[in-house]
Amino acid sequence: LTGLFNRRYLENMRERECRRAVRAKRPLAVMMIDVDHFKRFNDTWGHDGGDAVLRELSSVMRAHFRGDDIACRYGGEEFVVVLSEATLDSAFVRAEELRKEVHRLVAEHRRQTLGTLTVSIGLAALPDHGVSPEDLIAAADPALYMAKGPGRDRTATAHVLSQPLLRLGEAGLA
């Protein structure tokens, strides 16, 4: 449907990407993206309309991310992107660029405009939010809810651990 990788591919690749980043002492960020008010598109336009929204968003994502990034449909209207060699700051800039690009998107279904499409994005990065893929997803998910809380169409970063679990050179994933 989307032309993006699926959740199984993400699960296979995220462990490898985290190990590589830790071993090379390079940054890595995870972006969780959720289509705002997706149920409204399905309720108004049916599942075909919802599918059109997912296809349009996926098209923007394929054009927006680099070849080394791993963009996947995580489930339903949620997506996860693993950004290799991206710091939290650079991931935030890229997330905001994507969010603004999606906001300008004009999605159509059956020759009718579906309305404004927005996304909320949660970010986490290695090592500030952990060094395992599970740590990063566990940090990015609440950040996504922080982005949705005050009205959606926002990007939020996970809270930095007060004491990082491990510094890059100490991680047992190498």
Image (tube, rainbow, N blue to C red):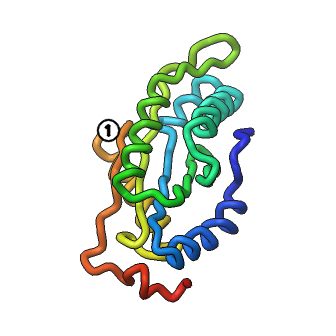
Image quadrant containing the N terminus: top right
* Quarter of the image where one finds residue 45: top right
Which percent across, then down, holds residue 56? 62, 29
In the displayed image of the protein, which residue is found farthest to the front? 24
Q: In this view, does 38 lie to the left or right of 122?
A: right
Task: Please tell me which residue is depicted at 71% across the width and 28% down the height of the picture.
Answer: 48
Q: In this view, does 154 lie above or below 102?
A: below
Task: Please tell me which residue is depicted at 49% across the width and 28% down the height of the picture.
Answer: 117
Q: Is residue 75 left or right of residue 140?
A: right
Task: Please tell me which residue is depicted at 50% across the width and 45% down the height of the picture.
Answer: 34
Image quadrant containing the C terminus: bottom right
Which percent across, then down, holds residue 171? 46, 85
Q: Mark 1 points at which residue?
A: 151
Q: Is residue 44 above or below residue 118?
A: above
Which percent across, then down, holds residue 140? 43, 60
* Quarter of the image where one finds residue 125: bottom left
